[in-house]
Amino acid sequence: MGSPELSTHLLNGEGARPYLDALARLRIAVFAEWPYLYDGSPQYEQDYLEQYLREPRSLIVLVRDGEQAVAASTALPLESAETEMQAPWRNDGAVLDEILYFGESVVLPAYRGLGLGRRFFALREAHGRALGRSRCTFCAVQRPADHPARPSDYVPNDAFWQRLGYRRRADLHCTFPWVDIGDDQESHKTLIFWERPLEPTEPAPG
């Protein structure tokens, strides 16, 4: 496939509502893959995304190829995120309103390798600086190395995140439930946090 003509939309709070269905479908499609194996539903997704719509300081980056949503990334102040994401930081003595929480980045397979992941990080970090945040964080699910659904050619993102300046915080983790594909009920998964400081002098992405 040739280089697609992509448009990038930076949305805040209720500004993302017209794209809610597209965002839900995109998340379901990408998170069905390893390592999340998420058996999602449109209703759950829309309920989940409401936290971004009701927070005017949130950021949703939506990338479209024509009218099709092909990638997205989210962030919001940690004090507005789910309590499961807040609790490890509270227990660590952190001040929540100094931290921007990154929810997820999802890219359809045909649009990977175009630099969207790096751009998503840059845009969210710039948003954090604009909000006066001093650091940012996200968490990633942990799966056993011998999990039967693990693809033989799977390469984790750890090295990529480290190149962007993120540090794995093995001491900070949370659990979050969802239904794995092929299962009948929810099970709790462990997610480990990563973080990096936000230097206020770093330029915003072009």
Image (cartoon, rainbow, N blue to C red):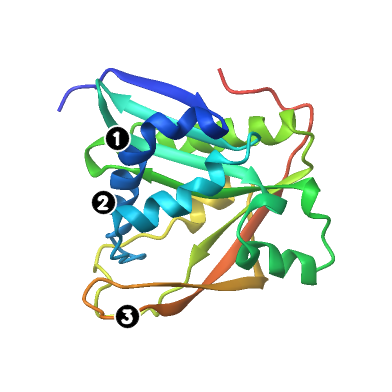
Give the residue pinned by disc 1: 70
Q: Quadrant of the N terminus?
A: top left
In this rendering, would 125 be left or right of 145? Answer: right
What residue do we see at 34% from left, 31% from top? 114
**Secondary structure beneath disc 1?**
strand
Q: CA distance from mark 1 to mark 2?
A: 10 Å
Q: Which mark is residue 185?
A: 3
Q: Position of residue 45 (x, y in %)?
A: 38, 53
Q: Vertical placement of 132 versus 152: above or below?
A: above
Q: Which mark is residue 29?
A: 2
- N-terminal of the pair, mark 3 or mark 2, is 2
What residue do we see at 41% from left, 60% from top? 156
Label 3 close to label 2 by CB (< 8 Å): no
- N-terminal of the pair, mark 1 or mark 3, is 1
**Secondary structure beneath disc 3?**
loop
Q: Position of residue 119 (x, y in %)?
A: 49, 31
Q: Position of residue 68 (x, y in %)?
A: 24, 29
What residue do we see at 65% from left, 64% from top? 83
Return the residue nearer the eye: 185 or 7. 185
Q: Nearer the viewer, mark 1 or mark 3?
A: 3
Badge 1: residue crowd in 10 Å (few <14, some 14–19, many ≥20) = many
Q: Name the quadrant containing residue 185.
A: bottom left
Amino acid type at mark 1: Val
Amino acid type at mark 3: Gln
